[in-house]
Image (cartoon, helix red, strand yellow):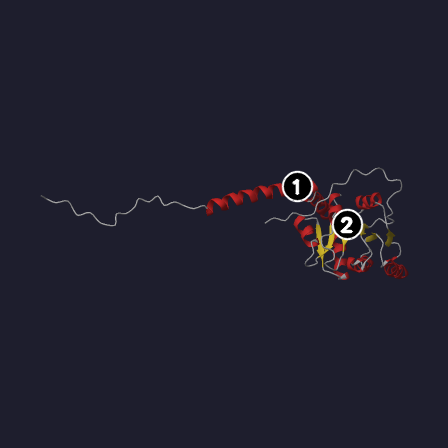
Amino acid sequence: CAVVPLGLTPPLPLEAPALPPPWSTQGMRVLGIGRLAHYKGFDTLIDAVAQSPEAELLIAGDGELRQSLQAQVDALARDGNGGRVRLLGAVTEAQKQQLLASCDVLALPSIERTEAFGMVLLEAMSHGKPCLASALPGSGMPWVVASSGAGRLAPVGEAAAWAQALRWMAAHPAERRAMGETGRRAFHNRFTAEANTRIEVTMKALARIQVTFDSAVAAPRFDITPPVDPMPKPPPSDR
């Protein structure tokens, strides 16, 4: 069998933005995108960035945890980490694409299998951005990142390990950019709607060949061996 992944249409070229991206520091730009819900694990990501002075984090999205996550961000500000973590709220599609184009790393720290695949990983890959995702068993996230070489994985819900992974990425910009370019190639080769169509066509052709082969194997066979005379003939007489 073969895996046919979900596919996206490649993003259109960005028009010149009316406003500059909302990053405020010169550190590594880490982007989170998604609903502010428990299964997304953004609290882990916020704690990890608090332990990573090289990183700035923007989270785009809204949801039921907006208030509690904002309280977490405010507590970091009181501890001297103000400005490095911000919640942007809901953004438009154009704003999302602008954020993806301007970030250094896309982080997806989901903690439950509710995150079945992580389409935002493909969106980041389409922009040539490396991904840092949860090594969540039973989710498609680890497969997408590992099979495409588009980034690294971190243990689920472990802020210290996520901070270590972020510090590694900040300290290795060349490797980070290489992962992003590898992910971009993988996106165009495997994760676009066009690539999915090619895979499906190939699989259907192989299935037809397999059916033909199985039919040939199962067809009745005819024995063409000459029959054996059950009564042996007597030897010729000397007379």
The residue to which callout 1 is attached is 197
* Above or below: residue 229 compared with residue 68: above
Give 227 or 52, whichever is nearer the viewer: 227
Q: Which residue type does callout 2 highlight?
A: Val
Give 236 or 49, whichever is nearer the viewer: 236
Dividing the picture into quarters, in which one does residue 37 lie? bottom right
Packing grade of label 1 (10 A; few <14, some 14-19, many >=20) is: some
Give 49 or 19, whichever is nearer the viewer: 19
One can see residue 172 in this view: no
Position of 129 compared to 95: left or right? left
- Choose mark 1 or mark 2, whichever is in front: 1
For this orientation, the residue located farthest to the left is 239
The residue to which callout 2 is attached is 105
Earlier along the polypeptide chain: callout 1 or callout 2? 2
Residue 198 picture location, percent across and down: 64, 40
Task: Tell me the residue at 74%/49% (across/down).
Answer: 119
Residue 38 picture location, percent across and down: 80, 60
Q: Which mark is residue 41?
A: none
Spatial separation of the CA atoms under disc 1 and disc 2: 29 Å
Dividing the picture into quarters, in which one does residue 225 lie? top left
* Above or below: residue 188 compared with residue 115: above
Residue 102 picture location, percent across and down: 81, 44
Q: Which residue type does callout 1 highlight?
A: Thr
As helix, strand or loop, the secondary structure at mark 2 comes to strand
Residue 59 picture location, percent across and down: 83, 53
